[in-house]
Image: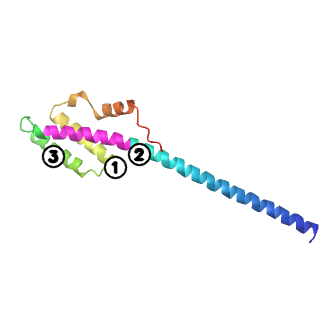
Amino acid sequence: MSANGAKKDLFDAVLDWEEKQYAQGYDAGWQAGVGEATVEGVKMGAEAGSVAGMRLGYIAGYVEVVKRLQGKLDASPRARSTLSQLDALLQSVDMDNLDEDIIIKIEGKFTLLSQQLRVKPNGVSTNALLNTANAKPQPDLSF
């Protein structure tokens, strides 16, 4: 074997070693990133789901009270129709696959119903609930 051949083999071995180290580092970084992203995604999903559940729960409770008081309320036919539509929307919500568009639609109907009934629900809006929810300490959902 010539001196140039030995140098070339040594150089190739160093390059191969460097490429293997790079690939191992890349794989380790990828795995760490995936793990951290998964934990962050779980935290964000739990927080968003909690807020959405609180918003929808408030509106669903309001609708139940209005339905029970419907005979005692002087509600217009439009208000009764809006109440029926809002109730149907709430029943159609898939809590396992919650879509922000349906929440916005429900909140719009809720606002409309409150205006039609000329009732401000205890002076509390779903935005106020959202701010209250954010002010409370959040549970530690870390693994």
Q: Can residue 74 be found in the magenta stretch?
A: no
Label ID, residue 84: 3
Residue receiving disc 2:
45
Residue at 18%, 40% (x, y): give it: 63
- Mark 2 or mark 1: name the one nearer the start of the chain: 2
Is label 2 in contact with label 1 (beta carbons under 8 Å)?
no
Q: Is residue 112 left or right of residue 138?
A: left
Locate the N terminus and report the quarter of the image it occupies.
Answer: bottom right
Left-right relation of 48 to 91: right
Q: Contact, CB < 8 Å: mark 3 with mark 2?
A: no
Which residue: 15% across, 46% down? 84
SS for tag 3?
helix
Q: Secondary structure at mark 1?
A: loop
Relative vertical location of residue 7 with respect to residue 126 in this rendering, above or below: below
Expressed as whole percent of the image width and height from the top left, the position of residue 135 reads 38, 29
Question: Percent x, y for residue 67?
Answer: 13, 41
User: Which residue matches tag 1?
Assistant: 99
Magenta: main secondary structure equals helix
Q: Which residue shows up at 71% across the image and 56% down it?
A: 21
Q: Amino acid at mark 2?
A: Gly
Q: Which of the two marks, 2 or 1, is nearer to us in this view?
A: 2
Farthest residue to the bottom: give it: 1
Q: Which residues are magenta?
A: 48-66
* Residue 118 image position (x, y, % from top left): 16, 31
Residue type at numbered disc 1: Asp
10 Å crowding of disc 3: few (<14), some (14-19), many (20+): some
